Amino acid sequence: QVRLVESGGGSVQAGGSLRVACAADGYISSIRCMGWFRQAPGMQREGVAFINRDRTTMYADSAKGRFTISVNDNVNNFSLQMNGLKPEDTAMYYCAARGDDCRTDWGTRVGAFPHWGRGTQVTVSS
């Protein structure tokens, strides 16, 4: 079993920066891909950024050039640095992990991830 707990988030004005982090414990050696999703009110949960154990990454188009995902050496903490935030980035942000690599869009869908945190709110005001 893998347990994920988010931290960080908060409120910021447009153009500002925030960092969200995810602490993982349990059967960490089973994790191959870690990711961040977000869900705004009334919207579907969507993938934002993903990182594999080999540090290869995938980003949603909305995140490219603004967000950076990283993971520590022990693969027990991964984070999302968000710069140039926009009001449309406002959402609950969830970290997730899975036991297979993320190499395709199919592999980064919500249903591909069995392990989830409870979320942390990010609010960007204009």
Image (tube, grey):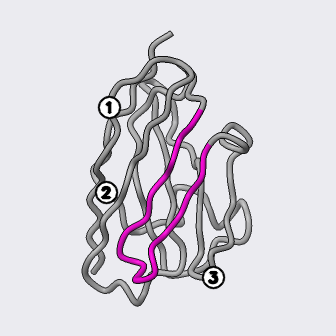
Chain-order first, disc 2 or disc 1: 1
Does the magenta segment cover residue 77? yes
Chain-order first, disc 3 or disc 2: 3
Q: Mark 2 = which residue?
A: 117
* Distance (Cα) linking label 2 and label 1: 16 Å
Residue 113 drawn at (x, y percent): 47, 66
* Distance (Cα) linking label 3 and label 2: 22 Å
Q: Looking at the picture, which amino acid does disc 1 mark?
A: Gly
> In the rendered image of this protein, does residue 48 appear above or below residue 35?
above
Q: Mark 3 = which residue?
A: 54
Q: Which residues are magenta?
A: 67-83
Q: Residue at x 26, y 70 (%)?
A: 3
How busy is the neighbourhood of tag 2: few (under 14 within 10 Å), some, or many (20 plus)? many
The foreground one among 97 and 77 is 77
Q: Is residue 33 left or right of residue 65?
A: left
Does the magenta segment cover residue 91? no
